[in-house]
Amino acid sequence: MLPDDTRRRIEDIVRGACLEGQSDHCTTARNFLCGRYPTSTTVKRDFQSKAIVKEEQAQLLEEFCVSQNLWLAGLPDENTYITRGGEARVYFDTDHRHVIKCNDAVYYATWLEFLNSITLHNLIFRNTAYELLGFTKAENTLYAVLKQPFIISYGRVELDDIRKLLEFNGFENSRRNDYVHKELGLILEDMHDENVLLNSNTLFFIDSVFYTVSPLK
């Protein structure tokens, strides 16, 4: 079950409150946007109409990154490039223990939604938490540059094992590989065997897509 402190922080994220007591770059950037924009409780609705808001937030993030020394010169060296997922370019980090993911937030209507999703991932899946290194641009596209532990998979993940673990933490399987936490107001998508890895009999959730919705009490 999710600890009470984690649940309280999730509730703060869903209701659009700033998170106190954390100084990591992701939380700081999220709080920066959160003070200016409401947190969405609709999923993939009016996606196109939010394009202007997303562009406004992108410009604000660029200004924020310059002021906070979080603006990066560019994407990592192409010699370290591994693959591209649905929304991220993945590179091998120079320490050989992490990967660098450059994410363009294409799955999210706004950058605040994206930062909420990363913050939720870090709260719920702590063993694969992201570190936000900063932001950069390539071909006029804004990317969040994230560092994450590199996990080697030593076995095939059973979808039933993913379901059991998520259900233990209060999520319900809504359809196929998507889940919902009605009490907390969360939707979690794409929990299949490419986004969850098995190592030493432990499941590692390496990619997640969270959305916030109105909780059902």
Image: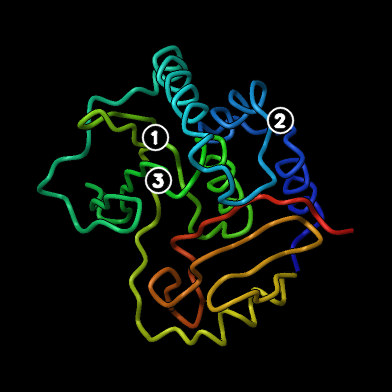
Q: Which residue is mark 1?
A: 133
The spot of residue 160 in percent (x, y) is 56, 87
- How far apart, in angstroms, are the residues tagged by discs 3 and 1? 19 Å
Instruction: Tell me which residue sits at (15%, 50%) in the image.
Output: 80
Of the 4 image quadrants, the one containing the C terminus is: bottom right
**3 or 1: tag closer to the N-terminus:** 3
Q: Residues within 10 Å of mark 1 (few under 14, many from 20)?
A: some
Callouts 3 and 2 close, C-beta under 8 Å: no
Q: Which residue is mark 3?
A: 106
- Residue 72 is left or right of residue 56, and the answer is left
- How far apart, in angstroms, are the residues tagged by discs 2 and 1? 20 Å
Q: Which residue is mark 2?
A: 18
Instruction: Tell me which residue sits at (59%, 48%) in the image.
Output: 45
* Nearest-to-viewer mark from 2 and 1: 2
Instruction: Tell me which residue sits at (54%, 28%) in the image.
Output: 29
Residue 60's label in the rendered image is none
Instruction: Tell me which residue sits at (34%, 57%) in the image.
Output: 86
Of the 4 image quadrants, the one containing the N terminus is: bottom right
- Residue 202 is left or right of residue 116, and the answer is left
